[in-house]
Image (cartoon, rainbow, N blue to C red):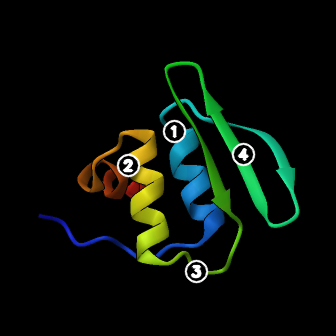
Amino acid sequence: MTKLPVVSGDECIRALQKVGYRVARTRGSHAWLVCPARAPVPVPKHHELGRGILRKILHTADIRVEEFVELLEK
């Protein structure tokens, strides 16, 4: 099993955009991402996302950790 990386909110948003998400709105320090084929996901725009929050984002978006790491590397 791949270890969950430590990323910023902006890095997470860029990776999710590669699978079809787009930023629908930003309010305060959170961006709301939507994708026609997947559930909407709120992403905090912090310098560093906690591992629990990142795991919840990936679970909601139905993306495995391995897939997410590959998206970060692209």
Which comes before the other along the chain, label 4 or label 3? Answer: 4
Whether residue 12 is situated above or below residue 32 in the rendered picture: below
In the image, residue 55 sits, relative to residue 36, either above or below, namely: below
Q: In this picture, is 63 found above or below 9?
A: above
As shown in the figure, which amino acid type bears the numbered disc 4? Trp
Q: Earlier in the sequence, mark 1 or mark 2?
A: 1
Residue 74 in the image: x percent, y percent? 42, 50
x and y percentages locating residue 27 in the rendered image = 87, 55
Q: Nearer the viewer, mark 1 or mark 2?
A: 2
Which amino acid, by three-letter code, is at mark 3? Answer: Glu
- Disc 2: which residue: 59
Q: Nearer the viewer, residue 7 or 37?
A: 37
Q: Position of residue 35 (x, y in %)?
A: 59, 27
Residue carrying label 3 = 48
Amino acid type, callout 2:
His
Given this view, does label 4 or label 3 mark the residue nearer the observer? Answer: 4
Tell me which corner region of the image, top left, top right, bottom left or bottom right, holds residue 45.
bottom right
Task: Please report the residue visible at 39 percent of the width from the left and 62 percent of the height from the top.
Answer: 55
Q: Which residue is mark 1?
A: 18
Verify CB contact (< 8 Å) between mark 4 and mark 1. no
